[in-house]
């Protein structure tokens, strides 16, 4: 199974939180939104995870590589 995670939005409605970081990196309950999503993927055990990134993609890619 392949999983596609769209994480490319600038998060304009979350401004000023998204002024320095992309929307998937906004912290909720102690971890970034993308962290919660990836934690759920552990239960599903997909063959491949495809992330569509855009705005400040370096921060997202760095977090995913570390975790």
Image: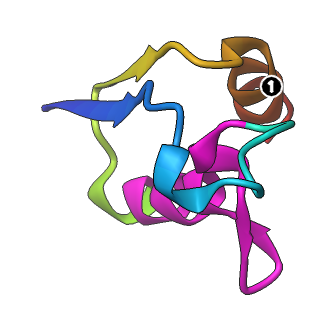
**Residue segment shown in magenta:** 22-41
| SS class, disc 1 | helix
How far from the left and from the top, in percent, is residue 24? 59, 47
Which quarter of the rendering shows the C terminus?
top right
- Nearest the viewer among 12 and 50 is 12
Left or right of 30 on screen, residue 55:
left
**Eyeballing the image, is 29 above or below 67?**
below
Which of the 4 image quarters holds residue 47? top left
* Residue at the (28%, 38%) spot, across then down: 46
* Residue at the (40%, 54%) spot, across then down: 41
* Residue at the (77%, 69%) spot, across then down: 31
Residue placed farthest to the bottom in the image? 29
Q: Which residue is mark 1?
A: 59
Label the magenta part by its dominant secondary structure. helix
How far from the left and from the top, in percent, is residue 15? 66, 54
Please say whether residue 30 is one of the residues in the magenta stretch: yes
Which quarter of the rendering shows the N terminus?
top left
- Nearest the viewer among 27 and 10 is 10
Circle 1 Cα neighbour tier, 10 Å, few/some/many (<14 / 14–19 / ≥20): some
Total marks placed: 1
Please say whether residue 47 is one of the residues in the magenta stretch: no
């Amino acid at each position: 199974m392949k999983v596609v995670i769209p994480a490319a939005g600038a998060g304009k409605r979350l401004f000023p939180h998204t002024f320095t970081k992309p929307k998937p990196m906004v912290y909720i309950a102690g971890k970034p939104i993308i962290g919660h999503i990836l934690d759920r993927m552990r239960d599903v055990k997909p063959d491949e995870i495809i992330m569509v990134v855009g705005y400040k993609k370096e921060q997202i890619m760095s977090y995913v590589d570390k975790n």
